[in-house]
Image (tube, rainbow, N blue to C red):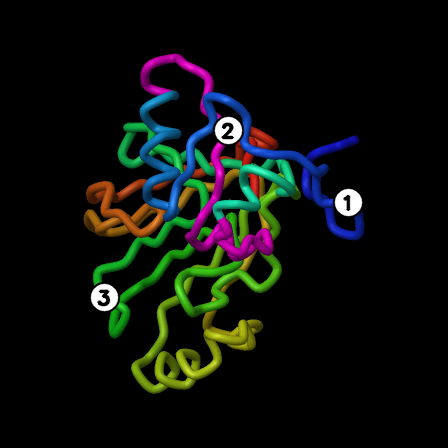
Amino acid sequence: MELGIRRGGDWGTGGELPDGGVVVSSDGEARELVEAARRSGEPVPVLGLAGGDLCRTLGGSGDLARLRDGGSVLTCDLGSVLLDGRIHWFTAHLVARRSWLSGRILVVMNAAFLGRWNLGPRAHPGDGLLDISDASLSLRQRLAAWRRLPTGTHLPHPAIATARRAAFTASFDRPVPVLLDGVRAGRARRITVRVESDALTVVV
């Protein structure tokens, strides 16, 4: 059976975390394992998702017993990103911003959720695309959008540029902090992102 997640199709196949699989409780933990494997040239292990935004997007419950017996095995996309020329990876999302209250905010979603916010209402971790929102809002517009973030109804918005792409590049006037899966990865002026389709196998 095809494991890749596709709208309107089966979401993977029944199975369990194999020997050598690793249970992670957050997107940050998942990213750390992905980065370590990629930098060492080793295969990325199968991940059992016990929490995090990717887990929630895939309908995971965080039930550890289910991961060992009766879970679903899925293949998901990964995001790879060059931050001023240095490569990193993310499993759920990228956020580039100085502040939520002012200035430009760039959000790249592989998962639908960032915490309690549905920042990528159309995002799908197995469609070979990343969902991009690029916004420079007034404070009044931000406050209005914030109220809609939990339900994903902040989009569409005339001041938020959106796209669904396999690759893209964004540039800032000066270096901006970049968070990958909720963990600060550094600062960058030029951010180049691309999707790695079906590069990650998970169990939920």
The amino acid marked with disc number 2 is Val
3D distance between C-alphas at marks 2 and 1: 19 Å
In this view, the mark in front (3 or 2): 2
The amino acid marked with disc number 3 is Ser
Residue range highlighted in magenta: 38-63
Secondary structure beneath disc 1? loop
Residue contact at pointers 3 and 2, CB within 8 angstroms: no
Secondary structure beneath disc 3? loop
Classify 10 Å Cα crowding around label 1: few (below 14), some (14-19), many (20 and above): few
Q: Residue 86, located in which quarter of the rendered image?
A: top left
Secondary structure beneath disc 2? loop
Depth order, front residue of 4/68: 68
Q: Which residue is mark 3?
A: 99
Quick one: label 3 or label 1, which is nearer the N terminus? Answer: 1
Residue 157 can be seen in this image: no
3D distance between C-alphas at marks 3 and 1: 39 Å
Taking the image as shown, residue 58 lies to the left or right of residue 105, namely right
Q: Which residue is mark 2?
A: 46
Q: Residue 81, located in which quarter of the rendered image?
A: top left
Taking the image as shown, residue 196 lies to the left or right of residue 141, namely right
Q: Which residue is mark 1?
A: 10
